[in-house]
Amino acid sequence: QVQVVESGGGEVQPGGSLRLSCTASGSVSSISGIRWYRQAPEKQREYVAFTLWTGVRTHYADPVKGRCTITKDNTDNTVYLQMSNLKAEDAATYFCVAVLTGGTQTWGQGTQVTVSS
């Protein structure tokens, strides 16, 4: 089994930065990639970014491209989502999803990002 836990959310002013963390535990060798999603109140869940577990390939959704960087720390099985120039529309609960070999997914509980002046 794999578990993922998000952290790093908080309140930031427009134009500010945050770094979200997704730490995996358990059978991490079965992870093929990590996706980040977000969901704002009364809005549909939205894909944000992806990295292969090896870190050799990443992908970003258009709304965050150029403002987000996803990286992998191999020493502690953590994937980071660095977000900069945050906008009001970035406010949401951000979820980390471990994509396992075979296609199953494991979701974290989410971390809240608030963008407010």
Image (cartoon, helix red, strand yellow):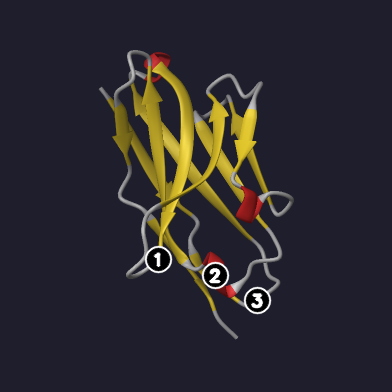
**Contact between labelled residues 3 and 1, with CB atoms less than 8 Å apart:** no
- The residue that disc 1 covers is 40
Whichever of callouts 1 and 3 sits on the residue coming sooner in the sequence is 3
- Residue located at (42% from left, 42% from top): 96
In which quadrant of the rendered view does residue 87 lie?
bottom right
Where is residue 37? Give x, y as percent: 44, 48
Please rate how many residues cluster around mark 2, counting C-alpha atoms within 10 Å: few if below 14, some from 14 to 19, many from 20.
Answer: few
Query: In the drawing, what numbered circle is on residue 14?
Result: 3
Closer to the eye: label 1 or 3 = 1
Amino acid type at mark 2: Glu
Whichever of callouts 2 and 1 sits on the residue coming sooner in the sequence is 1
Whichever of callouts 2 and 3 sits on the residue coming sooner in the sequence is 3
SS class of the residue under badge 1?
Answer: loop
44 or 77, which is in the foreground? Answer: 44
Where is residue 44? Give x, y as percent: 36, 58
Left or right of 72 in this view: 94: left
- The residue that disc 2 covers is 89
- Residue located at (38% from left, 54% from top): 45
7 or 44, which is in the foreground? Answer: 44
Where is residue 86? Give x, y as percent: 64, 67
SS class of the residue under badge 2?
Answer: helix
Amino acid type at mark 3: Pro
Separation of residues labelled 2 and 1 (CA atoms): 9 Å
Please rate how many residues cluster around mark 1, counting C-alpha atoms within 10 Å: few if below 14, some from 14 to 19, many from 20.
Answer: some
Separation of residues labelled 2 and 3 (CA atoms): 10 Å
Closer to the eye: label 2 or 3 = 2
Separation of residues labelled 1 and 3 (CA atoms): 16 Å
